[in-house]
Image (tube, grey):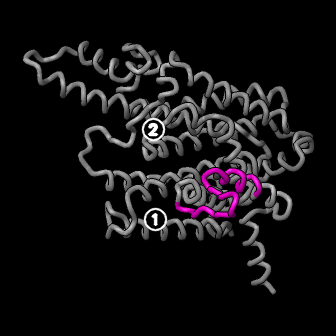
Amino acid sequence: MRTSFIAKNPSVLFFLLALAAFTITVTILSEGFGIGVISTSFIKTLGKTLCLCLIAVAMDLVWGFTGILSLGHFAFFGLGGYMIGMWLMYERTRLIVTEALMQGQIPPTEVEIIDGIGSQIFGVVGSNEFPLIWSFADSLGLQLLLVLLVPGILALVFGWLAFRSRVTGVYLSILTQAMTLALALYLFQNDSGLRGNNGLSGLQNLPGVGASQAVVSMWFFLASALALALGYMLAAWIVSGKFGSVIRGIRDNETRVRFLGYSVEAFKLAVFTLTACIAAIAGALYYPQAGIINPAEIVPIASIYLAVWVAIGGRGRLYGAVIGAGFVSLISTWFTGGQAPDIALGIYTIKWVDWWLVLLGLSFVGVTLFAPKGIGGLFDLFKKGSKT
């Protein structure tokens, strides 16, 4: 008798119910759709946290289940943000420029409008011409397609070169980190076509939408929750079948899996590319809520933080990745946003804005040494307790 996917994976149902309860509660308490208890700024924080949980699921799939410690997945996250950000910035600027030129006595030509848009977007880097990579910036459909294609192709090419050479372990981690650093350094240049260090801004304003930020923030929050639910179910479906058994085998003993006749490189490449696309979707939802994206978001340290989140939550268990990313993201907001009170010690005052990263590093070391299963490992204790 065949059992359903949910029956074989009850944790997925529990996760979806918890996420649904959380989403409904936030919606009721929001300013946009509810009674106004939760501010719009905090709604954006929660929406961004859900996006970080989604990329943590991707990281757990590639690291926790396949054993590939990628220190470059935030590059795919950032590329997804850049792809959607190009359309948001272009379309918003087009509306502003068109409205301004229409106030003249002579209607503007299409060339004048394009020149005006170029001057507004690229004037900050001393140019008014659209680079080739902006060829499809006027089409939302094509830019959404590029959200998947650009990071996916990069991951496919990079993974094919790395895996066919059988680069593994720390050497592969270094290569992914080098890829991320190279991309960030390229984007910092003014002639990269993406405004260099200035990045893309004003992304929180949806072109042609008259709704308030309170409503728009709820749209993105709900979209982030839906993306996390679908991404979690996809990852759970992957790891629960034969494919999941093979990638766990690769994680535990790659040589034996290859000896059994499986194409280890093909499995690694499939997981690496798929998780890059998931990370890109998370980024495409994250940066419109953040309002801005620049190359500093893609530097290697961001991917290292991602690995820390997954380790703290408990790698090798999808809900652990979500817990780790959500917990660290919200705690980070509290510490770095000035809500955490400073501690006066007489000759020195501990300011958590300065000490948060030290605390995060110590937490990672502590989890690694004393709780290798992370926060998610606490559920194992509850299971044991219920059986006794």
Q: Are the residues tagged 2 and 1 within 8 Å (C-beta)?
A: no
| Residue positioned 78% across, 76% down in the render | 381
Quadrant where the N terminus sits is bottom right
- Which quadrant holds residue 292? top left
What's the distance in space between the residues labelled 2 and 1, CA to CA? 25 Å
| Residue 292: mark | 2
Which is nearer the eye, 1 or 281?
A: 281
Q: Is residue 81 above or below residue 312?
A: above
**How many neighbours does mark 2 have within 10 angstroms: few (below 14), some (14-19), or many (20 or more)?**
some
Q: Is residue 358 magenta?
A: yes
Left-right relation of 119 to 164: left
Q: Can you name the residue that lies furthest to the front here?
A: 347
Q: Is residue 150 visible?
A: yes
Q: Is residue 166 above or below residue 304?
A: above
Q: Position of residue 61 (x, y in %)?
A: 70, 49
| Residue positioned 42% across, 30% down in the render | 86
Pick whichever of labels 2 and 1 is earlier in the sequence: 1
Q: Please, what is the three-letter code of the amino acid marked with disc 2? A: Ile
| Residue 59: mark | none
Q: Which residues are magenta?
A: 339-362
Q: Is residue 270 visible?
A: no
| Residue positioned 23% across, 14% down in the render | 112
